[in-house]
Image: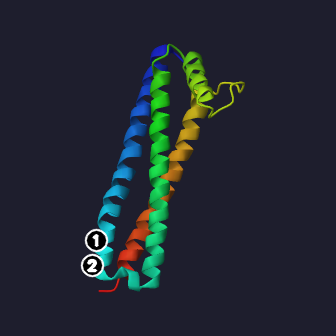
Amino acid sequence: MMDKAYRQRTAAFAAMLIKQATWPAAIVIAADSVAPLVASARGAFQAPIAVLALLVAAASAVVVLGLSALLVFDALLFRLMATHADEVSGGAAVDDILARMRLKPASSPSRPLDDRIAGTRRLLARQRIALAIFVVAFLTAGFWMPR
């Protein structure tokens, strides 16, 4: 891959990751900030299905926030890769950091950019699934709340 195209692709992917990590986390935080007020005012803790839905929503909210944090971390690693001249040196720098943080063995071979992007896209898909579970559980809890 040409140096300029590599840098642009990596930087664009990092910028996209920041956006994709931020908006689901903002939705979860906003919904979770009003949920206790609404639930206690409407007596949601009296309906067993509403309690179960709130527990599922809380668990999936934690997963969404955790995956958002991982996506931000990946975005920062992609930004680091974009500062290097080519794909090989950028991948080596990321692998070196991950080895120093003891998140990856030092002796493993460097992966190409496409493999790294594919792995991050899998994290993005998992975040979307967790967000969908959160929204369904949150709306279910709201539907089953006594009036």
Position of the C terminus, as image quadrant, is: bottom left
Q: Residues within 10 Å of mark 1 (few under 14, many from 20)?
A: few
Up-down relation of residue 36 to residue 90 (above or below) = below
Which mark, residue 37? 1
Nearest the viewer among 52 and 21 is: 52
Q: Residue at x 54, y 20 (%)?
A: 90
The residue where tag 2 is placed is: 41
Please say if the residues under marks 2 and 1 sit with CB atoms less than 8 Å apart: yes
Question: Considering the numbered disc 1 on the image, is that residue within a helix, a strand or a loop?
Answer: helix
Nearest the viewer among 110 and 50 is: 50
Up-down relation of residue 82 to residue 33 (above or below) = above
Q: CA distance from mark 2 to mark 1?
A: 6 Å
Q: Residue 80 at what x, y percent from top left?
A: 47, 23
Q: Residue at x 31, y 77 (%)?
A: 40
The answer to whether residue 26 is left or right of residue 3 is: left
Any part of residue 133 in sight? no
Tag count: 2
The answer to whether residue 54 is left or right of residue 117 is: left
